[in-house]
Image (cartoon, rainbow, N blue to C red):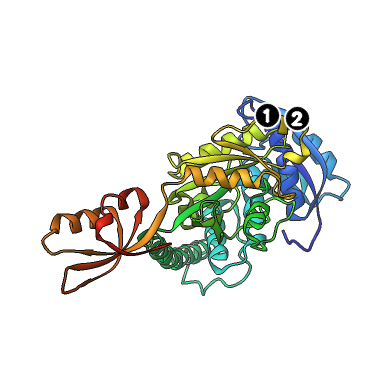
Amino acid sequence: MNAAETESAILISVDTGEFDAEASLDELRSLASTAGAEVLAEVIQRREHPDPALFLGKGKTAELKMLCSGGECTLIIADASLTPSQARNIEAITGVRTIDRTVLILDIFAMRARSNEGKLQVELAQLQYLLPRLHGKGTELSRLGGGIGTRGPGETKLETDRRHIERRIKALKEQLAAIEKRRGLLRARREKTGVTVVCIAGYTNSGKSTLLNALTDAGVLAENKLFATLDPTSRALRLPDGREVMLIDTVGFISRLPHELVDAFKSTLEDVVSADLILSVCDASDPEYAQKLDVTERLLSDIGAGAIPRITVLNKCDAVSGFWAVPNDRDTVRISALKKIGLEDLLSKTAAMLPGKRVRVRLLIPYDKGSVSGLVRRECAVLSESYEENGLSLTVVADTVFLDRIKEYIIQGENT
């Protein structure tokens, strides 16, 4: 799909009882709109499981064919992951191009990616999704277009496509590994210098970028669309106690997030895993906000961030009557990022939830106090050291609580 074109789509879904099919279909409608499609109709069927050949049953597939017979529909979108044979069979019966939820999300990500890393990650996710489905693509791969290399003797188009994709996946992984290494070095440098990291995470379109803008004047694109921001953005944030932290806005979550995206965006999501605190943002005006908070919690746990302290940020509370009458508890705060309401409480809670204040100090430890220098090396981030006439000179970043134990060796100090 192209963002500049308007597709006319019919959405199809099978309600097996495993999740709220109506809510999921509503979300699929929003995804389709974000991708540039106008939804003409929806077909939903209750079944114990999707039909292995047609996804929908034969009767519902016949109904779908009738809906497509007028020629207005140009796209069918399934609210599930289709097998190649299911997509091919639906297309054969209806004569309309058919995609699934994963392909739709991947296309939106491709539209939204701005940085080189984001584009590489999206392409990798698309190719990883496509590779096991090659046998269902026939002899032409419209998603790849041209660019396939010269075929060897006796090699079919499909085999050539597979080899091309496998080579491209390998190249993409190598490029992303290099970027991931640089990200790792930056994270290591932040840890060494005592930089505190706060990550904004949460369901897509919950107002994360609006919150980043409200707190830091970042100027990040903030639209009322799913996945309006894809590439992570970091800005410095001054807390009420004087500490400066790094605030990072991350890619939005969504229910049944394709594992290809989780794998491809591993380096980006590691910013969340290495954070000192997570602001878990949700849209409090959304009737499904509790379920979406659960999705965020599950995904944070899946990527290894389940044990990181977090504050639940109920955003868009200006659109919900009665929310302000309920007092905030220790781990929850109610705000309106758009109207900048409740931000002072959020900043205060952020400062309270973070580890003790970190400061940069210069120490001079006599040479006969080797146990003290060893303790400092274990407890502090050592920025520099030199051997002076009167002892070992160290510049470190340390917690103020720890500094009470070595205050007699401090000769110079400044807030980080």
- Dividing the picture into quadrants, the one containing residue 127 is bottom right
**Residue 230 in picture, x, y percent from top left:** 61, 58
Residue 92 visible, this angle: no
Q: Which residue does the image show at 75% across and 30% down from the upper left?
A: 322
Q: CA distance from mark 1 to mark 2?
A: 7 Å
SS type, badge 2: loop
Three-letter code for the amino acid on which mark 2 is drawn: Gly
What residue is disc 1 on?
A: 326
Q: Circle 2 is placed at which residue position?
A: 322
Residue that sits furthest to the right in the current view: 70
Q: Residue at x 54, y 40 (%)?
A: 311
Task: Return the residue nearer the eye: 333 or 404.
Answer: 404
Q: Amino acid at mark 1?
A: Val
On residue 310, which mark appears?
none
In terms of image quadrants, where is residue 60? Answer: top right
Mark 1 surroundings within 10 Å by alpha-carbon count, few (fewer than 14), some (14 through 19), many (20 or more): few
Q: How many marks?
A: 2
Q: Position of residue 155 (x, y in %)?
A: 48, 66
384 on left or right of 81: left
Locate residue 187 relative to residue 13 in the image: left or right: left
- CB atoms at circles 1 and 2 under 8 Å apart? yes
Quadrant the N terminus occupies: bottom right
Q: Is residue 363 left or right of residue 147?
A: left
- Secondary structure category for the residue under label 1: loop
Q: Is residue 121 above or below residue 38?
A: below
Q: Position of residue 64 (x, y in %)?
A: 79, 38
Q: Quadrant of the C terminus?
A: bottom left
- Does the rendering let one see residue 323? yes
